[in-house]
Image (spheres, helix red, strand yellow):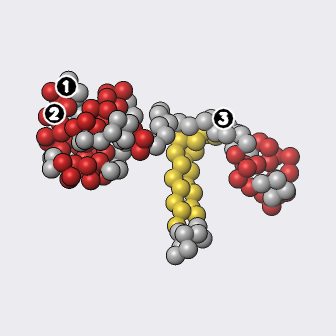
Amino acid sequence: MLREALRRRGLSLERIRDRLHAQQINVSLATLSYWQSGRSQPERHQSLRAVDALEPMLDLPAGTLRSLLGPHRPRGRTMPVNSAAPQSLYGENSDMEQALGEAFSHFNTGVQSIGIHETVCLDEHRSPPETSVTMVLKAVRD
């Protein structure tokens, strides 16, 4: 949406940066480029001010760009481990639960999730025949 609005108005990222700077909103060219390409999205207060200021510059109705923003990403180095995740992931009476028995309810306690990368491949029917999950964990006890 941002790329199309910039093209339609004939504005470069440099010109947008300069106009934002004139309103005491400092956003780098790299940041604007990341927003335009979808590599990142505005989340911080200053960035959201920039989004609000962009809409009149691009002749967009108020709230148009904000409505396209997804949920905020979690911040920080670690994410809490959801103790219900094994149950929901493997399901009640799954092979995993049967193999682990009583230990199943303690699955992944003692570890802290540092990062999760999920890859979902879609076939020609937009069905996910293949899913890959890679987790980086840190032991928080022996």
Q: Tell me the SS state at disc 1.
A: loop
- Three-letter residue code for mark 2: Arg
Q: Which residue is mark 3?
A: 141
- Three-letter residue code for mark 3: Arg
**In the drawing, does residue 114 fall left or right of residue 37?**
right
Residue 113, which numbered label? none
Mark 2 touches mark 1? (CB < 8 Å): yes
Q: Tell me the SS state at disc 2.
A: helix
Where residue 29 appears, as percent x and y from the top left, is 20, 41
Q: Name the one closer to the observer, 15 or 55.
A: 55
Mark 3 touches mark 2? (CB < 8 Å): no
Where residue 140 appears, as percent x and y from the top left, is 62, 35
**Mark nearer the viewer, 3 or 2:** 2
Disc 1 from disc 3: Cα separation: 51 Å
Q: Which residue is mark 1?
A: 23
Local packing at callout 2 (Cα closer than 10 Å; few below 14, some 14-19, many 20+) is: some
